[in-house]
Image: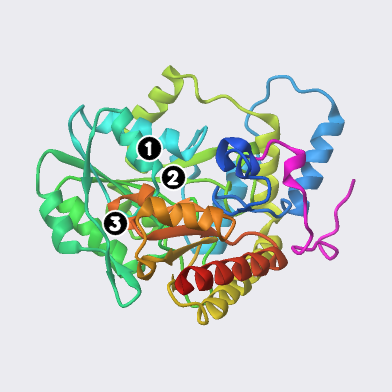
Amino acid sequence: MSVSYKSFSLDEEINRRDVPALKFHSKVLGSGGENLFAAGVADMDFKAPPSVLNALQKRLSHGVFGYEAVPDGLLPSLSHWLYTRHGWRVDQNHILRAPNILNILAIAASLFTEEGDGVIVQPPVFFDFFDVIKENNRSLVCNPLILKDGHYRMDIGDLERKASDPRNKMIYLCNPHNPVGRVWTRDELRVLGDVCANNNVLVVSDEIHGDITFADYEYTPFGSLGADYADNSIICLSPAKCFNIASCCSAFTHITNDTRRQAFQTENSRLTVNKNNAFANVAMEAAYRDGGPWLDKVITYLEGNAELVNNRLKNVSGVELIKPEGTFLLWLDFRRLKLSPEDLMSFLRDKAKWAVTRGHVFGEEGAGFARLNIACTRTKLDAALTQLAVAIDNLQRQ
């Protein structure tokens, strides 16, 4: 059935429990979680772009789902998107496929570091970085972000010290940053890139949230900084977040260095992770080719949701919003409530009826914080904020 862009509404409430959506599943919410505000897992409650839905319907109607090659239009649609949206002109020969971004991170660590080598991360940061490093028997090296006056920045002095240790061979960069919502500037990325290049530290940049940036901020693909920066990097890309197609898409890695790209391609073949899924191919090509207007509408809606959170929390003592620059994930500071990490999560779940992501899973620097997913209807978000305000008021009256 055709879906019209003009009739598309982000205010539509969709019962995601009709399918085994992870965000609403008992695996995440636990026992008795049916009435919780589910805002933990990082996907959206919005339907995918009409262009994607139409393309999937057309592919489904064909009825034959045998082995397929990569569609001729997929990589051109991606490269056109990167250039027109972000000013990054890429050579399609430098792009390889992968099942997902975590797969890229794991293969990069396996290929370009040895067991026991250090991989630098910048906590509080996406928790799966820690798991990939541990599961590949690499050493976790933390270069914590600095929080001052409600704003996060990189600790370049500490990064220089960590990068100068010859045992540390790689950094996992999160650009834009999950969970703190920073959209790193071109200058910040250049400084990091210079430190890493000068110390032979390879930059592996997770840029899955790159397409969701707010007004006055601009996502800079690390690979777009220049040839030298691109040569010392592996860029991880995917439409999973920005087009809300995480369960029916794959990922891409951009590698300009010929030796590393050939090694990565060989490893992909060895692990047989280079197969094609007809529906993922169709969804991704349609998203990159025709999904721009939908994404623009989503970003505007998310900005409105972020402003709602900001305005509501001005009247709630005990919680502070770290100003977001991008992504649909907000980083909330609850430290003034003086609750332990475990007590904070119990309070949010039992009293506010919130199921959000625990701050301390992003590293010890996240203790006292929580990550809130605002990619939901404004009505649902507004009701959840009322629940939080009432719960905090009751707590402070005790």
Point out which mark residue 376 bears: none
Q: Position of residue 189 (x, y in %)?
A: 31, 62
Circle 2 crowding by C-alpha within 10 Å: few under 14, some 14–19, many from 20: many
Span of residues in magenta: 1-21
Quick check: marks 1 and 2 in contact, CB under 8 Å? yes
Q: Camera-side residue: 93 or 5?
A: 5
Q: Position of residue 142 (x, y in %)?
A: 22, 49
Mark sitting earlier along the chain (2/3): 2
| Left or right: residue 326 compared with residue 158 | right
Foreground: disc 1 or disc 2: 1
Q: Is residue 337 magenta?
A: no
| Most distant residue in the front direction | 398
Q: Which residue is mark 1?
A: 105
Circle 1 crowding by C-alpha within 10 Å: few under 14, some 14–19, many from 20: many
Element on which disc 1 rests: helix
Three-letter amino acid code of the residue under disc 2: Cys
Quarter assignment of residue 80? bottom right
Foreground: disc 1 or disc 3: 3
Three-letter amino acid code of the residue under disc 3: Glu
Instruction: Give the CA separation, mark 1 to mark 2.
Output: 8 Å
Mark sitting earlier along the chain (1/3): 1
Point out which mark residue 236 bears: 2
